[in-house]
Amino acid sequence: MTRRSILMMTASMAWLAAAAGARAEDQKAAQVDDIVVTGSRIAGGDRIAPVETVGRDVMEAAGIADASQLVRLVTANSGSEAQVDQLNQPQSSGTAQFNLRNLGLGSTLVLVDGQRWTTSAVVATDGSAFVDINSLVPMIALQRVEVVKDGASAVYGSDAVAGVVNFTTRHDVDRPEISAKYAVADGSEESVVQAIGGFDLLGGNLTLAASRFHRSALGSDERDFTQAERYGRAAWTAVTSYGQPGSYFRPSRNGFSPDPACGNPAFASAYKNTPTDSFCRLDYSDFFDLTPEETRTQLFADYRRPVGDMTLSLQAAWSSTETVARQSPSLPILAQSLTVPASHPDNPFGEAVLFRGRLLGAEAGASKADFEYRTWRLSAGLDGRFAGGWTWSLAATSSRQHVAYDKPDAIGSALQRALNGFGGAGCDPATGAAGVGACQYFNPFGSAYLGTGTANSAALIDSLIGYTGLRGAATLTTADASTSGQALAWDGGSVDVALGAQYRRSGFRQDWSDLVNAGDLLTAGYSPDFEGEQEALAAFAEARLHLGDRIEAQLAGRYETYDGEGRFSPKAAIRWDVTDALALRASWGQGFRAPSVYAQSGAQASQPSVFDRGAFVFVNTLTSGDAALKPEKSESLSLGAVWRPLDGLEFSLDAWRFDYTDQVVKEAAQAVIDQAAAATAAGLRGTPAQGRITRSASGALTFVQLYFINASSIETQGLDLAARYGRDLWGGRATASATWTYVDAYDIRLNDGAAQVSGVGSTNLSNIGRSLPRNRGEFALGWSGGANAVTALIHHTDGYRNDRSGITDTTIASQTTADVLYSRTLGADIDLALGVVNVFDKAPPLAQFALGYDPVVADPRGRVFNVGLTKRF
């Protein structure tokens, strides 16, 4: 732990203790009530689990306008892809997810009111399937978010390896309310209008909520820390040797030559590193979104009514998200090697050459990718009580997310025909003549733009552009039955028991355009259509033992089968209230996660940035699924203490450890490339790694074949520290809270024969992890009295290292930012809120990523002002 981190924790704890002591003698007794939270199937049995609760007040103080921003409030979370990064996550823009303990985007189970939600219809670039938290319910319908931070597979089944996040909604809203919020940062703005109300209907209570969220785009050209020129257009910035004007492989020289027009002032973003550089390069740092243009509409309905001695509950949710993400003017030509014939009228080289570049240059402006997500969920439940006092519950849910993803890309076959003089929608190569009539030459050289060569018409360019055309869906159907009650009781003790069963059916399909199916898009490469399904059956039992008022113990077990594969997940936990002020708790459990339908039967094309032969390049990859993948397995252990030395003051400390084996991951392209390079350097031929790499005639890297595999293990351990305090002060109520997560170890072993790699305090770009700072802390100070309230939040992230290949500075500095919210009640029915996120306008710490910062950890927006108004009726 760094000295600065220790000092910050010590100072925070000292402040809390001093504030408590100042009022200890005359403070009235104020019991800190236990909050009933996720973690058990037995009511009132949640004290054992280490749970963090994020309430509505904290969300409002942090300026949370959409669910993607929630992940930064939970210190146990790291490595979420909650912001747009078109370079590294181009197929999942507009989605967000939790990633507890950095064990994977799909290793945290997400629930809404205790029930599962379908995974997203898209996956991350590494192939991870996840639940899109942006698609759940309107923010105004949330009461709190409960985060169980230890393994919970014994209680909840597959996917709860790292823990559970339960979104608890509001019910029985007495007074309708409507709120509007507007936020503005330099270069971007966002707004959200929300409403919620409760109504009596047919003997029950109906809660309705709706929201409309809109965020404008924040472009990389709006921030100076993203600009490649700021860093001398270093190789690690957003620059590429696939430019426009481009470069050409000349057989007579056995090497590349830049376009003769490269360096002309008309091409401001084109350049050569030196006058003798073989490549015409492109600075594309101006063409990406740091936050995309996004519009989201959400509806939510919850209905509950008594039916005799039973309670009927019905719930419906619908969400529509539209995201437009900017990207470079056109994408690099990667999937094929294209030839410009010697007969081309604009070819200045006098011989047939291979084209290295892209269809359009910076002068065309940014292109755009469109994402549309439509999500719905229906659930129904019936609860009752047996004559003996036991409760029973039946529930069923059905949910679905559909995606439409369209990204422009050059059509390989059409572009090659056009280079041969047979371009244009009206050209028939079988009957036409090159460059005659409807058949046109496409001029790839800078002369087309300068007017010194054949100009390319807009119609010709349009005929060379196709779209990914992804249409996909993910579905989930569940049915649950459970019962719970007291099984045994005696003087000084009792045993409560819960029993239940669950059925699940999940499906996933993706249908790409014919161009992608044929591998005819020059960057998207080849992706086949596929459809898969998985069924699971589970039975669980949980027992809660009470020994007097001091000891509680939990025993839980769940047997779950999927596609004929069975797994048993046990858990044991205990809490001992040593005194009224001190409690000790411990838990141990084993869990598993079934391979996703996507990892078993899907296929994913992607274009990661890799380091090859002294330069960063984008390369086509295809990762294929494997039906024989084993389930992921985990073992978790936690030891904790809760201390209440004074009324109103509480500390908790939990030590945790996860051993996660057989994790299903996508192979890293960089690792395969490095293995092949090492084999070549050693004089070897025909090795497996070399056989999975394709190069063009010039030696340029064009394709890498990857697979979903079971990685050997991740072992991680650390500490969670939390404190909270409340006291009367200045005629109102003052509160303080702190949460801190320290990661002691995060050790990765890719396979049984691989060396163990430490991923703690690293970006983990060279392995299967994600960015993982060692320390993260969240602090909150608040005061409310009468009509006024003020809250301050402090967010701290420790410094960490950048393990990206080919960089010159591996350090990423720590960052501490502060948010402030002031609210005032205007009369009895109107609340006004004024807030500032990132009060001191701190830019993200410099990281040698393409755009100068780490999008997994840092927020690029800077200072954000917001104002909100809430009206109750």
Image (cartoon, rainbow, N blue to C red):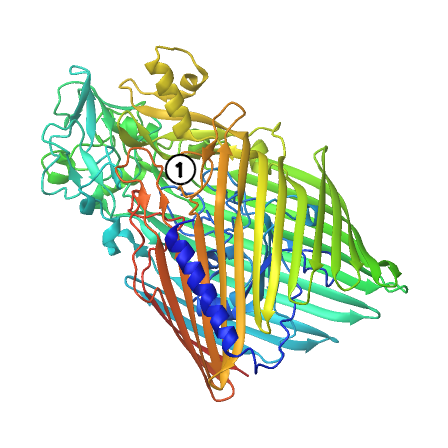
Instruction: Give the number of marks.
Output: 1
For the view shown, which residue lies furthest in the bottom direction?
827
Residue 73: x %, y % from top left: 47, 59
Where is residue 504 shown, x and y percent of the image?
70, 45
Query: Which residue corresponds to the image point at 42% horizontal and 11% vertical from the top-left?
Result: 686
Which is nearer the eye, 332 or 346? 332
Front-lying residue, 149 or 566? 149
| 278 sits left or right of 482 in the view | left
**Residue placed at 35% from the left, 30% from the top?**
619
User: In the rendered view, does 351 fall on the left or right side of 68?
Assistant: left
Which image quarter holds the C terminus?
bottom right
Q: Residue 839: which quarter of the image? A: bottom left
Q: Is mark 1 on a helix, strand or loop?
A: loop
Q: Which amino acid does label 1 sit on?
A: Leu
Residue 109 visible in the snapshot = no
In the rendered structure, the answer to whether residue 278 lies left or right of residue 120 reads left
Establish if 778 lies above or below 199. Answer: above
Against 729, residue 536 (above or below) is above
Residue 191 placement (x, y as % from top left): 40, 68
User: Is 458 located above or below residue 622 in the figure?
Assistant: below
In the rendered image, the residue lying farthest to the right is 387
Q: In this view, does 78 lie above or below 764?
A: below
Asked if residue 701 can be seen in this view, the reply is yes
Question: Residue 222 or 340: which is nearer the viewer?
Answer: 222
Rendering coords of residue 409 (x, y %)? 34, 38
Estimate how packed mark 1 is, as few (under 14), some (14 to 19) or many (20 or more) residues with alpha carbons within 10 Å. some
Q: In which quarter of the image is residue 167?
A: bottom right
Q: Which residue is disc 1 drawn over?
A: 765
